[in-house]
Image (spheres, helix red, strand yellow):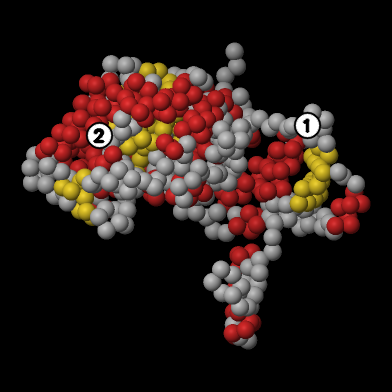
């Protein structure tokens, strides 16, 4: 029997009454699909389970109309009518041998109420953080009792929908449970406010309620932000972030820890590299015996092994890396490390959710289309059985991806690039400070093509229309992009800037290559 340095990543881990087949854990993340597109949501998560993620989670799931996040497309479990849509996802994930997790959430004053018209709730009266001129009502004891009941009802519905792991969520400064924990939001003077133990009370109660309701057959996970990067104004991992985990150390079946808010948790590659959350979450395993999952945009299997062997994490959490390559676990298992489509940390996935549409991914063009178009990140199928020959003009990301996909579908390609560099604009962008990971867009596709005899690659091959016709290749793909207007005409300016005597306009490429500084030097001279 052969062994691999990565075998430790494929050991099963017990999470309460459940056992996950390996250490790969897709933590909850938004998709822009949610309750409005349940088939698309289920298909997206199913592909990850197929690709080897041992646990696959939903995004946050609203537990009550007062948690309405409209117009955002999150999950929804307001009543029994929402169970079938969520069951689709749970069953799709479990069909591939993975555990399905659901992140229950009440958004407190982060809710919008735009659809439900329910008043927002908060520990103390405050304004909405959606930007609407609305006020959240400070909760009285009846509201707190009702909230606890809503969470129990949602947990029971989640169990009925078939989920294996049910979350109690206090993170990202977006949930009522976290709002009660934070002194800057919780100004109460009763037993739910004031000192640390009082602010922890509701969290402790809801965790106990959830365990009592479903803990016999479902694992209970806590998702907690241990640091907000706000200094003394917020949670700090060495102060109350640690205190919370010490106080509840053995209560949940799993600790899912990160930093807050979501913009800190999902920092871009320009500002944060792989493992950037480690300084904040390193303490957790020292104060609990329960399994711990954490994130850090991990794509390196060596880094993953280090985290497990050092006792930092039991499970390797991921959101963005699981989007960029749903098959990352299986590729590590099979020794196909060069095939891993690594996340570049550009956050176009986040922007899709913010735009209230199914998300996209720079690295994985199939994301969001797994159900509607039947796209699969690893399987390319064509309508025609007979192999054809394609000429692709343009060696940027689009041309390279077209070439890769066609070869994978059984065709032959000739890829011609006018310049002496593959990658188009991304070759310029990835040379900028902090953006080296963006080069993965070029490098992964180039390596894939270089392994294929059916792909002929040519640099310094500028082609005219007559050149293309002379080749006689029947199928032609133009991937040359577009040219920027340099006269300043656009959405808001209808006349060329030259009409006002302004300086010439730079294209983004010219600016990135130093054109602005050269222009200023010429201007001074």
Residue 45: horizontal and vertical position, in percent? 49, 31
| Residue 457 vertical placement versus 493 (above, below) | above
Q: Quadrant of residue 121?
A: top left
Q: Residue 384 shows which numbered tag?
A: 1
Considering depth in this image, is 97 or 88 the residue closer to the camera?
A: 88
| Residue 187 vertical placement versus 221 (above, below) | below
Q: Is residue 22 left or right of residue 509?
A: left
Mark nearer the viewer, 1 or 2: 1
Considering depth in this image, is 422 or 309 the residue closer to the camera?
A: 422
What secondary structure is found at the residue carrying circle 2?
Answer: helix
The quarter of the image holding the N terminus is top right
What secondary structure is found at the residue carrying circle 1?
Answer: loop
Earlier in the chain: of badge 1 and badge 2, it is 2
Q: Residue 245 shows which numbered tag?
A: 2
The answer, for residue 520, to whether it is visible in the render is yes
Say which residue appears at 20% left-offset and 46% top-offset: 122
């Amino acid at each position: 029997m052969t062994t691999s340095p990565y075998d430790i990543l494929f050991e099963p881990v017990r999470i309460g009454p459940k056992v996950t087949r390996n250490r790969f854990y897709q933590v909850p993340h938004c998709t822009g699909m949610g309750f409005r597109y349940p088939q698309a949501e289920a298909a997206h998560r199913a592909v990850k389970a197929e690709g080897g993620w041992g646990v696959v989670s939903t995004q946050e799931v609203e537990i009550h109309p007062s948690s309405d996040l409209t117009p955002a497309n999150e999950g929804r479990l307001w009543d029994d009518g929402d169970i079938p849509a969520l069951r689709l996802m749970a069953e799709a994930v479990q069909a591939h041998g993975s555990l399905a997790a659901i992140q229950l959430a009440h958004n407190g004053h982060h809710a919008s109420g735009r659809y439900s018209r329910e008043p927002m709730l908060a520990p103390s009266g405050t304004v909405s953080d959606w930007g609407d001129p609305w006020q959240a009502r400070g909760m009285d004891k009846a509201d707190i009792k009702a909230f606890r009941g809503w969470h129990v009802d949602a947990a029971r519905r989640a169990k009925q929908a078939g989920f294996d792991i049910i979350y109690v969520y206090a993170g990202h400064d977006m949930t009522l449970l976290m709002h009660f924990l934070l002194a800057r939001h919780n100004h109460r003077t009763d037993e739910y406010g004031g000192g640390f133990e009082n602010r922890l009370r509701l969290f402790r109660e809801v965790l106990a309620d959830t365990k009592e309701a479903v803990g016999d057959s479902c694992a209970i996970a806590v998702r907690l932000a241990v640091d907000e990067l706000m200094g003394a104004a917020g949670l700090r991992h060495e102060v109350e972030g640690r205190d919370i985990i010490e106080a509840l150390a053995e209560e949940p079946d799993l600790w899912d820890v990160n930093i807050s808010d979501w913009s800190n948790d999902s920092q871009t590659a320009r500002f944060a590299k792989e493992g950037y959350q480690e300084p904040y979450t390193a303490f957790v395993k020292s104060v609990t015996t329960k399994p711990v999952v954490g994130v850090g945009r991990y794509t390196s299997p060596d880094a993953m092994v280090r985290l497990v062997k050092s006792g930092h994490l039991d499970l390797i959490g991921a959101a963005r890396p699981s989007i960029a390559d749903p098959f990352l676990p299986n590729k590590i298992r099979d020794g196909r490390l060069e095939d891993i489509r690594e996340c570049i940390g550009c956050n176009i996935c986040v922007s899709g959710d913010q735009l209230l549409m199914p998300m996209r991914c720079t690295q994985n063009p199939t994301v969001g289309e797994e159900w509607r178009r039947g796209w699969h990140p690893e399987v390319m199928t064509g309508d025609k059985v007979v192999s054809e020959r394609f000429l692709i003009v343009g060696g940027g990301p689009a041309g390279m991806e077209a070439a890769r996909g066609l070869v994978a579908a059984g065709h032959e390609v000739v890829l011609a690039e006018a310049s002496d560099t593959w990658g188009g604009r991304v070759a310029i962008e990835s040379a900028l400070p902090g953006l080296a990971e963006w080069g993965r867009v070029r490098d992964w596709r180039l390596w894939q093509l270089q392994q294929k005899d059916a792909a002929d690659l040519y640099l310094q091959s500028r082609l005219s229309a007559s050149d293309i016709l002379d080749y006689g290749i029947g199928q032609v793909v133009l991937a040359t992009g577009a040219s920027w207007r340099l006269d300043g005409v656009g959405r808001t300016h209808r006349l060329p800037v030259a009409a006002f005597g302004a300086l010439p306009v730079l294209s983004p490429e010219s600016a990135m290559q130093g054109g602005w500084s050269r222009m200023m030097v010429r201007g001074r001279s």
